[in-house]
Amino acid sequence: MDKDSEDILNLLLQNSSWVSIARQADIEKANRVAELKIPGVGFTDTYKRVYPAGTMAASVLGIVNMAGDGVEGLEYYYNDELNGDVDFKVEDSKTADGYLSLAQDNVQTGFNLKLTLDSTIQHLIEQELDSIMENGQPARATILAMDPMTGKILGMGSRPTFDPNNYGQTKEEQRKNLAISMNYEPGSTFKIITGAIALEEGVVTPEKKFNDPGYIIVGSRRITNWDSYRKAHGVISFTEGMKLSSNVVLAQVVADLGKDTFYTYLKSFGFGSKTKIDIAGEEQGLLIDKKNVKSLELATMSFGQANLVTPIQLLTAICAVANGGNLMQPYIVEKITDQDNRPIVTKNPKVVRQVLSKTTSKTMTDILVEVVESGTGTSSKILGIKVAGKTGTAQKIDPQTGGYSKTDFVTSFVGFAPADNPKIAVLVIVDSPTKGIPQGGTQAGPHVKAIIEGALQYYGIPMSSQTPSDISNLEDLPSIENPQEEPVIPEGTPGKDEVVVPNVLGLTMRQAGQKLGESGLRYEFSGSGLAINQFPQAGKIINQGDTVKVEFSPEGPNSGNKDNKENNENEDNRDD
C-alpha cells in the first residue's frame, strides 16, 4: 500500500458511501493500519494467488487480475474450475501422486488442477533456457517436452519470462507462451513430416536414389543446399538425403508426391489448425491456400519454408512419427480434484486420428537415428541410447526488404528417445541468436541432448557407462587434413573493401586466426580443438573488418561439420 497521501485524501473526499483505498494489501501493512484504529477505516478478507515457484512455468500458468479472475494461460482457460463455478460429480477413484503444483491460494477455494508437467523435467527446461539466453543471447527461446505415446506435456517454458507474483510492471511479450503462440517457419525439422508422408505413400523408400548436383531449378528459381558452396552430393539415397539435410532431394520428393496428397496429409497432421491444447493463447499457424501453391512454393514447403507452424503443432506431429503413427491430443491438466483431493475429472490419452502406419513410423525413426548418429544431428548423440532427431536453421524475413535475411535465423532441434520406445520428445527453438554460430545443431542440439539425457536418467533408463573424457587444449596441435582441400569457390566477385571468406575448417585456433587476419577479418571463437563450423561459410563475400564466427571441438571436423548452416540460397535468399 504505497499510495501517495494526496491520492488517499482525494479518495476519501469522494461523495460515496465507501471507497477502496487499497486491494490485496500486504498483511503486515494492513495490521499496522488496523492498530491505529482510525474511525471509518475497515478491512475485508479476500484471496490472493501465490506462485511458490516464482518464474517456473510462468507463461504456462498465466496470471489473475485484481478480482481473482484468470486472464492468461491456465488461469484463464480453467478460471471457472479454479473459482468453483462448475458443478462436477466426484469420481470414485484414488488420486495419484507426483504432480507438479505451481500455484496456490492463501485460502483454498474452488477446485485444484493436477498438471502433467513433471517438476524434474520442467527444472531441466528452465535451466537450459537460461543457458540458451546467456550463451546465444537470442531475442527469445522456447522449449517443449512431450510424452510421445500419450500427448502429455512434460515441460514447457519460454524466454523472456516473468514472475507471476509481481506481473504488474511486465509487458505482454514477456508473458507470451511461445510454445503455443509462436508462428514461425520451421526449416529442416519439417523434413521429418515430408519424408514420413512420402514413405507412407510409397513415393520413396530409404534406398531410393536421387541426383543431387547441389541445386535444382524449380520454375524460375534455383534452389540449393546448405552445403552447395562446398560440393555436389551426386547420386544419393533418400536416407542419405535426410542425413545430409538435402533441400534438393526433398524438393524432388514432394514433386513426386504432388500438391493434393501433400496438403491432405498436412491437414491430417494438424497443420493450419489449433491442437486444442487446454491452455489459453494458442495460435494456429498458417498454411498457404492450396490454390495459390505453385511448383516453387511446393518445393520450399518440403523443407520447412513458406508455411508457418507453432511449436506445439510441430512437436505433436513429430510425436505421431515417433509413436507408431497416432496423432495424440496434447494436454496439460491431467486431473481436477476437490478441496479434499478427491478426483473430479481425470483425463486419459486421446488419439485424434491415425496419420501413419507403424511401418512408416519405424522406417522414419530409423532414418532419424542415422541423422543423429552420423548426419547433421550429432550434437544430440547420447552414449548407450538411440536418439532420433533433426536440425533446423531457417532464415527469417527481413522487414526492411521483404526477403529472407542473411544474418537473422530461427535455429531449432527436435529429438526423441529411446527411439524404439520413446519416453520423451523435446523441441528447442532459439530465435535470432546473436552469439555463437547460428545453426540448429549448435544453438539447440546440445540442449535437447541435456534434457533427454537428464529425463532418461530420472526415469531410470540405463545408459552407457562411458563418459566423455576431459577436453584437452588442442590449440597448438597440427591441423588434420582439411576436409575442403579443393579451392574455395567465391559466390561472386568481391567489390571494393570486400573479401571472400576463407575456409578454416580443420584448423587450430592459431591457424584459423592467422588465416582470417590475413584476409582482414575479425573473428569470434568458441570451444577448443579444431574448427568444425564457421559462419559465414567459405566462399561468402563480406566486408573487410566483419566478424567470422568459428566453433572448435577436440574431436575435429567430423564431429560437427555435417551440421553446418543449412542454407537454401536460391534467388529469393531463402534458407532451410
Image (cartoon, rainbow, N blue to C red):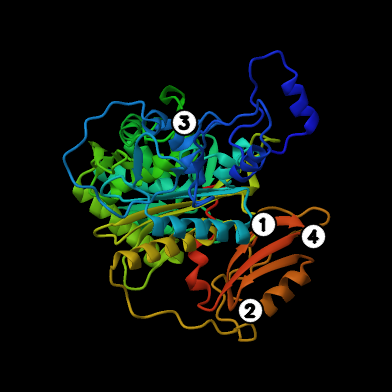
Image coordinates of residue 181 in percent, x first then y, are 49, 37
In the rendered image, the vertical position of residue 527 relative to residue 190, given as above or below = below
What kind of residue is marked 2?
Thr
Check disc 2 and report the residue beneath it: 508
Name which residue type carries label 4. Gln
For mark 4, give the secondary structure.
Answer: loop
The answer to whether mark 4 and mark 3 are in CB contact below 8 A is: no
Quarter the N terminus occupies: top right
Mark 3 is on which residue type?
Leu
What mark, if any, has residue 278 been given in the picture?
A: none
Question: Closest to the observer: 209 or 516?
Answer: 516
From the image, tell me which residue sits under label 4: 544
- Callout 1 secondary element: loop
Dot 3, crowdedness within 10 Å: few (<14), some or many (≥20)? Answer: some
Extreme-top residue of the structure:
15
Side (left or right) of 469 relative to 348 = right
Lower position in the chain sequence, tag 1 or tag 2 = 2
Distance Cα–Cα, label 1 vs label 2? 21 Å
Image position of 214 with respect to 69: above or below:
below
Q: Residues within 10 Å of mark 4 (few under 14, many from 20)?
A: some
**x and y percentages locating residue 58 in the rendered image:** 51, 45
Tag 1–tag 2 contact (CB < 8 Å): no
Residue 123: x percent and y percent?
A: 45, 58
The residues bearing labels 4 and 3 have C-alpha atoms spaced at a distance of: 40 Å
